[in-house]
Image (cartoon, grey):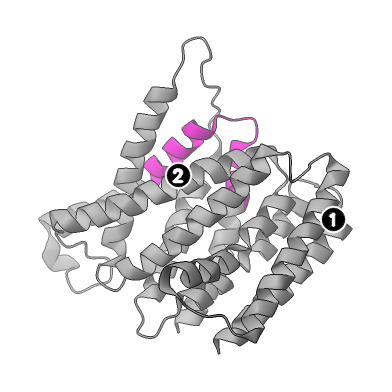
């Protein structure tokens, strides 16, 4: 069941990526982040209010938000801070790079998760997993080569670095979420994470504000879509992690199939170029993910 949930989360995640790209085009990144997290918080607020004032109506449902200890709030705040950091890096890259480049880069997160598991937990990779890692590395070299045709050099473009760093921090978040979801309610984690994200982004927004260079912000309906798809993909993903025996390496891998949705969005909505070479890179990444899947069986 948790594998099916991971695939459903992947579809929502792809729609989330497309919505982000639409929202940040010719728009202020921090403002988009602020309003999307605010809308996500407001969507969850009625559930929190019912849980607090009329708990008898939903106490036995998945949506009930229990009271949490201060220690638990600390854990959730750390998650919010990690995610906001990854967002700031990822959104900055997404605004300035084609989604057909940032999508495949983000699809390498399962490799990063595996390598982090090796470094942090001392896990060992088997032959299939090493093949998957090597194929992913090769695909990134090819992606670097094909992106130069669009004037984007991986070694000299800071937004490429931002995209990779955002993906790496996102991988750390996935490992941390595996720990969280063995102990805490899914909707409680979502609600308090969204609240703390609003607080963190508000502070960053206030510190970054300049009267000499005011933020240019245009409201777009895609910002509401960001909030909606974020909640949907997060809810299904976090719920998958609660299953006994759920493997974060497999879930991370399956969720990265969202690159197929975001890549299609790049073709249909953004009319991006140099697609033939990028499709080859994408196929290699998918084959690499397949070998990672074989290695975890």
- Determine whether, in the image, residue 1 is placed left or right of residue 262: left
Which residue is painted at 64% across and 30% down in the image?
A: 26
Residue nearest the viewer, comparing 61 with 280: 280
Membership of 145 in magenta stretch: no
- Determine whether, in the image, residue 7 is placed left or right of residue 39: right
Which residue is painted at 66% across and 62% down in the image?
A: 259
Residue nearest the viewer, comparing 241 with 71: 71
Read off the residue under disc 2: 85
Q: Residue 36 appears at what percent x and percent y?
A: 45, 42
Residue nearest the viewer, comparing 10 with 109: 109
* Residue 224 visible (yes or no): no
Figure quadrant of the N terminus: bottom left
Which secondary structure lies at badge 1?
helix
Say which quarter of the image contains residue 107. bottom right
Q: Dot 1 surroundings within 10 Å: few (below 14), some, or many (20 or more)?
A: some
Pick out the residue farthest to the top: 212
- Determine whether, in the image, residue 7 is placed left or right of residue 237: right
Query: Which residues are the magenta region?
Result: 18-40
- Do residues under tags 2 and 1 come within 8 Å of each other at their CB atoms? no
Which residue is painted at 11% across and 54% down in the image?
A: 53
Magenta residues: mostly which secondary structure? helix
Pick out the residue farthest to the bottom: 297
* Residue 174 visible (yes or no): yes
Say which quarter of the image contains residue 176. bottom left
Query: Which mark identifies residue 275?
Result: 1
Query: Which mark identifies residue 43?
Result: none
Q: Residue 55 appears at what percent x and percent y?
A: 13, 63
- Separation of disc 2 and disc 1 at Cα? 30 Å
Q: Dot 2 surroundings within 10 Å: few (below 14), some, or many (20 or more)?
A: some
Q: Could you tell me how many numbered marks the image carries?
A: 2
């Amino acid at each position: 069941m948790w594998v099916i949930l991971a695939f459903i989360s992947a579809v929502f995640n792809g729609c989330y990526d497309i919505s982000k790209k639409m929202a940040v085009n010719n728009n202020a990144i921090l403002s988009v982040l602020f309003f999307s997290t605010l809308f996500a918080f407001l969507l969850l607020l009625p559930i929190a209010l019912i849980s607090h004032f009329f708990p008898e109506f939903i106490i036995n449902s998945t949506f009930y938000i229990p009271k949490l200890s201060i220690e638990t709030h600390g854990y959730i705040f750390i998650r919010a801070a990690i995610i906001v950091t990854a967002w700031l890096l990822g959104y900055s890259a997404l605004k300035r790079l084609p989604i057909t480049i940032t999508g495949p880069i983000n699809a390498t997160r399962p490799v990063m998760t595996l390598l982090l598991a090796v470094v942090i937990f001392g896990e060992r990779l088997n032959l299939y997993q090493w093949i998957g890692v090597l194929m992913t590395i090769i695909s990134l070299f090819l992606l670097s080569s094909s992106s130069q045709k669009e004037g984007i050099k991986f070694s000299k473009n800071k937004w490429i670095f931002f995209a990779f760093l955002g993906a790496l921090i996102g991988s750390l978040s996935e490992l941390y979420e595996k720990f969280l979801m063995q102990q805490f309610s899914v909707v409680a984690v979502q609600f308090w994470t969204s609240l703390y994200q609003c607080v963190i982004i508000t502070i960053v927004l206030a510190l970054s504000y300049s009267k000499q260079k005011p933020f240019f912000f245009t409201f777009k309906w895609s910002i509401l879509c960001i909030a909606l798809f974020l909640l949907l993909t997060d809810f299904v993903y976090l719920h998958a992690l609660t299953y006994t025996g759920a493997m974060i390496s497999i879930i991370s891998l399956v969720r990265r199939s969202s690159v197929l949705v975001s890549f299609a969005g790049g073709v249909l909505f953004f009319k991006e170029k140099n697609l033939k070479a990028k499709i080859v890179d994408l196929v290699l990444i998918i084959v690499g993910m397949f070998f990672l899947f074989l290695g975890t069986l």
